[in-house]
Amino acid sequence: MSGMASACALGMAVMLAPMQGHAGNVGYFKDGSCSLSGDYAARITAAGHTPVAIGSLDAASLAPLDGLVAVQGCNGSAFQATNAAVNDAVAGGMALFLEIQDIPAGSGVTLQLPGIAALPVTDGCSLDASLAAGSPIANGPGGTVANANLDNPVLCSLTSWVNSSALPSGGTPLLVDATDPAKVGAFGYVHGNGRVVFSMDQFMYTMTGGGFHGAAPIAGSDAYITNTIAWLVPSTPAVTCTSQGYTGTQLTWCQNICEKGYTGATLNMWIRRWLGRWHDLPYCANTTPPPPPQGD
């Protein structure tokens, strides 16, 4: 068979498999029986990911996840220590958004987090939170987080804080007390192959679906939680003919093969034309030919 005939035969057999943007599986776990915390599934969806309800923080439950939102409220145990399964999952690449509304009172309390044996935390209440300078969650799929939309006079925006000097190496402050930016109420850091955000707040109550959303809403709650999830678990952009760098005729023909929805004779015609000019197939083409018909 000639080279061109072979290419045409291959072109006729090409199975097209367009690549889509990757939406991660992000679990959400609520510690305690509190019914006042908001709708985290909606925030995960708004961040571009697939929400997965998690009933237990064990290795089997965490294994399929790209990220986890773990929330403590009401009668929760305050997550004074993440367990070994969570620590191992983060080290292996899972992102963790740990949001708590209470720690035991005192200024000398230490919490154990992934990669941090003892983090000194001060219990308190700040009604005036601000974005840290250069905070990466100021904008995102949830909208804009601004100093003006983080507070109300009823609930604490920040419920505790860590002194900036005690942050882990490379830690990124996200939210701080407006009157004393050294008091860091939320920060991110890297552990192994994963990333962690630790946030001490009451936004779980003031976000959409939260028990205080109607009576004492904090407008930035939804934006803060959504943007934080999106920052922790970025979506993989969809692969397209344009993103692959094709231009001119090659861009048009790639779009005809991969993105116009052509089938049958029309699709095969464009594949033959492509193979007649270029040796590499476009991104959406699987070049594995089907098995020969029985009897050949």
Image (tube, rainbow, N blue to C red):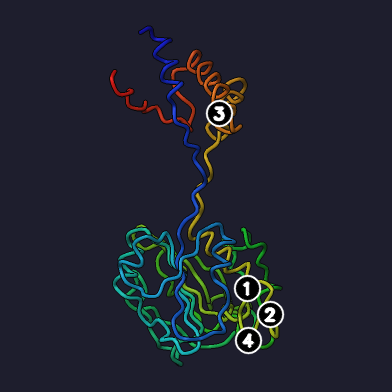
Work out how far the residue at label 3 is from the one at label 2, CA to CA, in angstroms.
Answer: 51 Å
Q: Marks 4 and 1: in contact by CB < 8 Å? A: no
Residue at the disc numbered 1? 221
Q: Please state the horizontal and vertical placement of residue 122, each as a whole percent of the image.
A: 47, 85
Q: Please state the horizontal and vertical placement of residue 239, each as a whole percent of the image.
A: 52, 39
Q: Please state the horizontal and vertical placement of residue 177, each as a whole percent of the image.
A: 59, 78
Residue 9 to residue 134: above or below: above
Instruction: State the image quarter where residue 134 is shown.
Output: bottom right
Q: Which of marks 1 and 3 is nearer the N terminus?
A: 1
Work out how far the residue at label 1 is from the one at label 4, CA to CA, in angstroms.
Answer: 12 Å
Residue plotted at (48% across, 58% down): 233
Instruction: State the image quarter where residue 220 is shown.
Output: bottom right
| Front of the two marks 4 and 2 | 2
Q: What residue type is labelled 4?
A: Leu
Work out how far the residue at label 1 is from the one at label 3, CA to CA, in angstroms.
Answer: 46 Å
Residue sitting farthest toward the top:
2
Residue at the disc numbered 3? 263
Residue at the disc numbered 4? 155
Q: Which of marks 3 and 2 is nearer the N terminus?
A: 2
Q: Look at the numbered disc 4 and give the secondary structure of its residue.
A: loop
Q: Which amino acid does label 2 sit on?
A: Pro
Q: What residue type is labelled 1?
A: Ser
